[in-house]
Image (tube, rainbow, N blue to C red):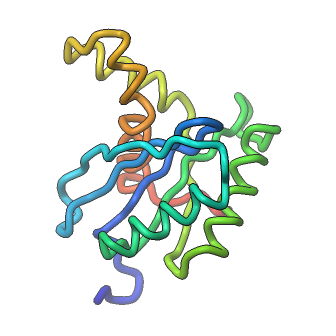
Amino acid sequence: MREAGERPKRVLAVDFGDTRTGLAATDWTGTIRVPLAAIVGRDDARCAQEIADLAAERETEAIVVGLPLDGEGKVGARAQRTLNFVATLRRTTAIVVHTVDEAYSTDEAHSRLKDLGVRAAKRRQVADSVAAMVILERFLAFGPDRR
């Protein structure tokens, strides 16, 4: 059990996408971050349920969803779609759901994978979950957005 004001240790991060949703999580100590298998599909309710189920299975204390703000930090069409998904996810689980600015997280994921020598075809398959790991790192370092 966490003390009031203490940061969650078990966090599940989500890089929400139209066809593939990347996932990453911390271990039970909150120190190790790992990418997880992505969810493939276009059904937001099913995706939210799969995330809620995984979060419960992992005894997750918080979920963080990357929010694709525009270049000025404002909510555009893509960010609004993500906020609609966040609302669906919040209705699906009792676990607190936060957002964090995901600006350039996919670019950073591709860069990390390229630096590791991962070929382009494989990078496309795992980039969403590595982007979720970037989102997770940002949340752990800076906390949530106020949305």
Looking at the image, which residue is at 35% across and 47% down? 137
82 to the left or right of 56 = right
Quadrant of the rendered structure where residue 99 is?
A: bottom right
Q: How many marks?
A: 0
Q: Is residue 113 above or below residue 67?
A: above
Q: Is residue 42 above or below residue 144?
A: above
Q: Is residue 78 above or below residue 66?
A: above
119 to the left or right of 39 = left
99 to the left or right of 130 = right
Looking at the image, which residue is at 66% across and 54% down? 44
Q: Is residue 78 above or below residue 112?
A: below
Residue 147 percent across, percent down from the top left: 68, 62
Quadrant of the rendered structure where residue 92 is?
A: bottom right
Q: Name the one closer to the observer, 10 or 121.
A: 121
Residue 82 percent across, percent down from the top left: 69, 49
Q: Name the one closer to the observer, 119 or 115.
A: 119
Is residue 101 in view from this perspective?
no
Residue 50 percent across, percent down from the top left: 49, 61
Q: Quadrant of the N terminus?
A: bottom left
Is residue 36 in view from this perspective?
yes
Q: Please identify the residue farthest to the right as the structure is shown.
A: 77
Residue 60 percent across, percent down from the top left: 36, 72
Looking at the image, which residue is at 39% across and 50% down? 136
Looking at the image, which residue is at 72% across and 55% down? 83
